[in-house]
Each structure stands twice: as C-alpha cells, then as structure tokens.
Amino acid sequence: MTADHIPPADQPRAEARRAQILEAAVACFRAHGFHGASIAQISKTAGMSAGHIYHYFENKEAIIAAIVERDLERLLTLSAEMRSARDVLEAMIERAAEGVRDNLDPESAGLKLEIVAEASRNPRMAEIVRNADKLCAASLAETLRTMRRNCGHHDDEAEIAGLTEVLAAMFGGLLVRSVRNPGLDQDMVTRMFQRVIRFLVTETLSPAAEKPVH
C-alpha cells in the first residue's frame, strides 16, 4: 500500500504505522545486518504481522529506501535552517557539533555503514543511496555558495563542488572512525571540524584568485 491509496482520514494512523515499522527495522538491521534481518524479525519487533508490514512496504529494500528518505529530509531541513540564519557560517559551525555527534554514534554509524555496504553490491540500493546523496550534496552546495558569497568570494561551480565533496567526506569519514577508534575525543574532533569549516568557507579557494592583477 502506498500513500496514494490511503484515504486522507487514515493518513495519520498510516504514518504512525510506517514510523513504527521503520523503528523496528532500524533495530533489526543494526543487530543483524540487512541480510540477517528478516521481515519476520521486523514484524515481531514492531508488534504486528508480516502481512501488515507488506501493506506499507513491498520488501526490505523499500524499508531501507524509506529510512534513507527520512534521513535525507532531516538533512535538507537542516540545510534550509542554516541558510535562513542571520549568520549562515556561524550557524553551520554551531551545527557541526551535532553532525559530529550523530556520525560518531555507534548505533547510527553502524546502520549507515550497513546501508552503504549493501549499496556496494546491490544496484537498486546503490541507486537509492546515490540519488539521496545528489539531493543532499545539492543542498549543501547551495548553503556553501551562500556563505562564500557572504564572505566576498565568487566561486565557479567546480570549486563549490569540490568544497562540497570535502565536507561530505569529512563527516562521512566519521562513520568509519567511530568503528575503528570508538574512544576518540569527540570534543576535540568537533573543535577541529569547526576550525576547518571556518577556514574552507572564508579562505580563497582558487590560487589564481590570489595573484595580483597587473
């Protein structure tokens, strides 16, 4: 069953059911991995029948797609909130602490790494993950473009794209670090990230732009 087939009066209940299923699936994927978690396990954790789950999600891939979409919506909302702030740069630096904390959280990191691992061998999952990444990167690029202009810089699209990838790699890399070094100093990492963000946003990106005009 999709949202298009649910009567408007039943939408709130349906959304609550979907959220219940997603939370149960997240718990199962974290504990058993994508392939180790079955619909039967998810249904037991959610406290509903497997048939009921299939009313909302066709299969496990559809559940993962909904989890990815939920995370994407949160990130897009975050970007929009930063762009609407009086000082966009300071808003991003402040919210960097939240990004570091979320990506170093063992449970959150484990789930995201499981999704990425599945995407590396499952074409459908790869499509879901890459489409979400494109939308997230576009929103981040818009935020960075706004901040750079506020700092007096006028960058071309290649420079903004490169800056976007660097920041995405920084935060994405924390997922792996959370596994390899679970005891790292989160406060120290947050301070370093904030310093790097400030530098990347405020400094000149193109060496050619630093040369004096004769």
Image: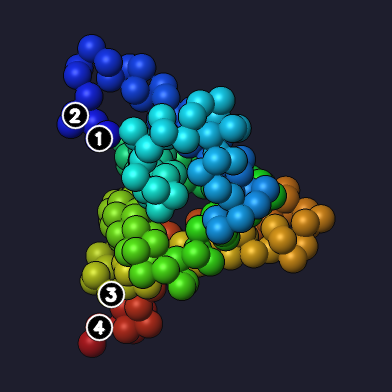
* Label 4, residues with CA under 10 Å away: few <14, some 14-19, many ≥20: few
Q: Amino acid at mark 3?
A: Ala
Between residue 112 and residue 15, name the one nearer to us. 15
Instruction: Give the mark toward the camera: 4 or 3.
Output: 3
Instruction: Give the mark toward the camera: 2 or 3.
Output: 2
What number is the disc on residue 24? Answer: none
First in residue order: circle 4 vs circle 1: 1
First in residue order: circle 4 vs circle 3: 3
- Which of the image's four quarters has the N terminus? top left
Residue at which label 4 appears? 213
Q: Amino acid at mark 4?
A: Val
What x and y, as percent, mark residue 52?
Answer: 41, 30
Give SS at disc 3.
helix
Q: Amino acid at mark 2?
A: His
- Which of the image's four quarters has the C terminus? bottom left
Q: CA distance from mark 2 to mark 1?
A: 5 Å
* Label 2, residues with CA under 10 Å away: few <14, some 14-19, many ≥20: few
First in residue order: circle 2 vs circle 3: 2
Question: From what the image shows, is residue 81 above or below residue 7?
Answer: below
Give SS at disc 2.
helix
Between residue 152 and residue 100, name the one nearer to us. 100
Residue drawn 38% across the image and 37% down it: 54
Kindly indicate whether the residue at mark 1 contacts the one at mark 2 (C-beta within 8 angstroms): yes
* Label 3, residues with CA under 10 Å away: few <14, some 14-19, many ≥20: few
Question: From what the image shows, is residue 77 above or below residue 182?
Answer: above
Residue at which label 1 appears? 2
What number is the disc on residue 158? Answer: 3
Q: Amino acid at mark 1?
A: Thr
Kindly indicate whether the residue at mark 3 contacts the one at mark 4 (C-beta within 8 angstroms): no
What x and y, as percent, mark residue 197?
Answer: 51, 58
Residue drawn 37% across the image and 82% down it: 207
